């Protein structure tokens, strides 16, 4: 049986609290909601390996059917190193989302620092085939190994 120290208990509490913060943005009636979670069991802080999952919900609050065609992510770690990731669809899919419907998926992000930020966009097509971008809100990746400060 492992012994819980005040520091490990504080990290677990901070991780649990961070897991319930969601970020939202709406573009042209498409509402994106992202909820990041620090993955303690997949991370190895002593090796500078920190992992987060993020659950995304794409809600079509608009009046027409849309299809998600591609994604772009900008991932920045605590040292300011930025990586851009682009690709077709999400998790191998290019979902069609009718008015009043939603699509959910979960993905992940590893970093070499205990904190970072992600922001991005989805490229969608409307019923006429016209492409448009939908903002993914910036969201913070905070591990319990990060000291928070107010800026």
Image: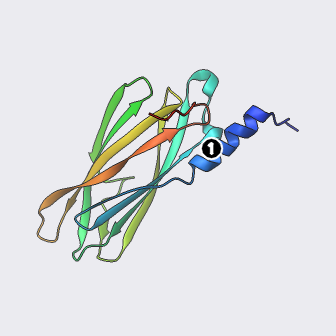
Quadrant housing the N terminus: top right
Asked which secondary structure carries label 1, the reply is: helix
* x and y, in percent, of residue 142 in the image: 53, 38
* x and y, in percent, of residue 77 in the image: 42, 29
How crowded is the residue under tag 1: few (<14 C-alpha within 10 Å), some, or many (20+)? some
Against 4, residue 16 (above or below) is below
Residue drawn at x 33%, y 63% is 31
Q: Hey, which quadrant is residue 98 in on the image?
A: bottom left
Against 112, residue 17 (above or below) is below
Drawn side of residue 127 relative to residue 113, left or right: left
Quadrant housing the C terminus: top left
Residue drawn at x 78%, y 35% is 6
* x and y, in percent, of residue 76 in the image: 38, 32
Q: Nearer the viewer, residue 21 or 107?
A: 21
Q: Which residue is mark 1?
A: 15
Structure colour scheme: rainbow
Residue at the right extreme of this rendering: 1
Residue drawn at x 61%, y 27% is 45
* x and y, in percent, of residue 79 in the image: 42, 23
Against 128, residue 35 (above or below) is above
Q: Hey, which quadrant is residue 44 in on the image?
A: top right
Drawn side of residue 150 relative to residue 68, left or right: right
Q: Hey, which quadrant is residue 25 in on the image?
A: bottom left
Looking at the rendered structure, the number of numbered marks drawn on it comes to: 1
Residue drawn at x 56%, y 24% is 48
């Amino acid at each position: 049986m492992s012994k819980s120290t005040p520091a490990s208990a504080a990290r677990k509490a901070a991780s649990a609290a961070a897991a319930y913060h969601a970020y939202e943005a709406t573009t042209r009636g498409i509402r994106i909601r992202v909820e990041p979670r620090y993955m303690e069991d997949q991370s190895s802080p002593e090796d500078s390996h920190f992992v987060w999952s993020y659950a995304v919900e794409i809600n079509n609050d608009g009046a027409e059917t849309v299809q998600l065609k591609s994604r772009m992510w900008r991932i920045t770690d605590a040292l300011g190193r930025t990586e851009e990731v682009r690709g077709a669809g999400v998790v191998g899919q290019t979902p069609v989302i009718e008015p009043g419907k939603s699509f959910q998926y979960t993905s992940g992000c590893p970093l070499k620092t205990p904190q970072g930020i992600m922001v991005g966009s989805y490229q969608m097509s409307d019923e006429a085939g016209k492409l448009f971008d939908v903002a993914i809100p910036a969201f913070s990746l905070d591990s319990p190994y990060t000291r928070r400060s107010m800026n």
